[in-house]
Amino acid sequence: MARAVLLTGDAADDLDEICDYIARRDSPGRATHVLDRIGQAIAGLAETPERGAVPAEPAALGIRTYREVFFKPYRIVYRVLPDAVVVLLIADGRRDMQALLQRRLLEA
């Protein structure tokens, strides 16, 4: 059974920031391509949300309630609920993910 896939406001802002950055630094066409590929990865969570791995940073703290999928170098961190998948973070994995995940997931 397909689950609804929801983006938090922060995750939607992440997408906007990623697209704006790529459009400025590379091209609008490349930004659209990246947005489409991230969108495909997110849409796939509706059918198979368990396919994602537990992110290493929260797992090191004993927290295993989050999962992640990739469109490299972007990490899409989400939580699987009984009737929905909630995307909490979309970020370039080259960032300081420990600090970013702690700040974002503790707020969730």
Image: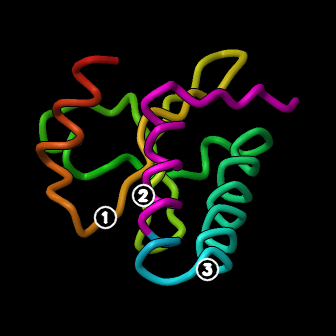
Q: Disc 3 marks which amino acid?
A: Arg
Residue labelled with disc 3: 30
Q: Disc 2 marks which amino acid?
A: Arg
Q: Is residue 40 magenta?
A: no
Q: Nearer the viewer, mark 2 or mark 3?
A: 3
Q: Is residue 6 above or below residue 60?
A: above
Of 103 and 4, the residue lying toward us:
103
Of 36 and 61, the residue lying toward us:
36
Q: Is residue 33 above or below residue 99?
A: below
For the N terminus, the image quarter is top right
Q: Secondary structure at mark 3?
A: helix
Q: Secondary structure at mark 1?
A: loop
Q: Position of residue 61 (x, y in %)?
A: 12, 35
Residue labelled with disc 2: 75
Please name the residue shown 64% across and 62% down the image: 35
Contact check, label 3 and label 1, Cβ < 8 Å:
no
Q: Is residue 76 above or below residue 78?
A: below
Q: Disc 1 marks which amino acid?
A: Gly
Residue stretch in magenta: 1-21
Question: Earlier along the polypeptide chain: callout 3 or callout 1?
Answer: 3
Q: Nearer the viewer, mark 3 or mark 1?
A: 3
Contact check, label 2 and label 1, Cβ < 8 Å:
yes
Please name the residue shown 47% across and 38% down the image: 13
Residue labelled with disc 1: 93
Q: Is residue 18 magenta?
A: yes
Q: CA distance from mark 3 to mark 1?
A: 18 Å
Question: Earlier along the polypeptide chain: callout 2 or callout 3?
Answer: 3
